[in-house]
Image (cartoon, grey):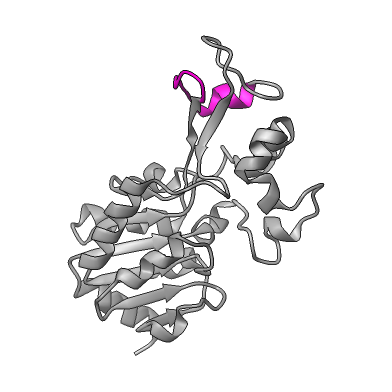
Amino acid sequence: MDQINKLKQMVEESGNIVFFGGAGVSTESGIPDFRSVDGLYSQQFAYPPETILSHSFFINHTEEFFDFYRKKMVSQTAKPNAAHKKLAQLEREGKLRAVITQNIDNLHQAAGSKNVLELHGSIYRNHCISCGRFYDLNFVLERQGVPRCPACGGMIKPDVVLYEEPLDTEVIGRSVDYISHADMLIIGGTSLVVYPAAGLVRYYRGKKLVLINKGETGYDRNADLIISEPIGSVFSRI
């Protein structure tokens, strides 16, 4: 049995699937990942992307942060690909219980997924760090330099988890609960090197662990099925 047919069979035999995804899920929608040949980490910037996307850089070099953020972290033209659409379909069919994503692009929701746990937040939510007022993405994009709250003058911060910042404990707790009770865990588009998010995988106790990623991951030896192809291409065939 080939890999795609084996994956189809595993999905058909499962009723409590959880999907855990990373940047590779959105590359086929035109959003660059971080660590591939064409990823952000391979491009040349005045500072390394890890530095720019850190809390301390945001505080100390806010204008440079927003310049990079608007140019490289936001893509309003991206559309859901076959992976996003198939996951939404599996949820509608009652087979998939949750999508746990490291992405901040909202493409799972755009495809129709309802139960999406965003480990690293979303570009579509922004808050004033002084008064807490909410602002949408357009407000941030339409401003020049550092966006400021019209009500109090405070700085507006995207609701994304930067380096040096903790993940939301409630989202982590819910993710652990879904993964630990899943009868099938599909991991896609992630090299599983970004912690603490990657550490969630160890809570899976089932016998159907599937890894779909173009490159190797640190969890390959634990997988029941490995498919080394773009995830959108894989999901378009199941």
- Looking at the image, residue 197 sits to the left or right of residue 154; the answer is left
Residue occupying image coordinates x 67% and y 24%: 146
* Name of the residue lying farthest toward the top: 151
The location of residue 118, given as percent across then percent down, is 40, 48
Q: Is residue 147 above or below residue 152?
A: below
Instruction: Pick out the residue farthest to the bottom.
Output: 1
Q: Which image quarter: residue 175?
A: bottom left
Q: Which residue is located at x 29 percent, y 63 percent?
A: 18
Can I make out residue 238 in this image? no
The magenta stretch spans residue 140: yes
Is 132 positioned to the left or the right of 90 in the image?
right
Q: Position of residue 203 (x, y in %)?
A: 30, 69
The correct choice, above or below, for 192 with respect to 135 in the image is below
Foreground residue among 177 and 70: 177
Q: Is residue 110 magenta?
A: no
Is residue 144 visible in the rendered image? The answer is: yes
Q: In the picture provided, is 67 more to the left or to the right than 118?
A: right
Viewer-proximal residue among 5 and 24: 24
Q: Is residue 70 above or below residue 46?
A: above
Residue 219: x and y, percent?
A: 45, 78
> Quarter of the image holding residue 86?
bottom left
Magenta stretch: give its range.
129-142
Viewer-nearest residue: 146 or 3: 146
Q: Kindly identify the residue that appears in the image at 29 percent across and 53 percent down.
A: 173
Viewer-side residue, 84 vs 185: 185
Q: Quadrant of the C terminus?
A: bottom left
**Residue displayed at 46% across by 60% down:** 196
Residue 55 point in image, percent of width and height: 60, 42
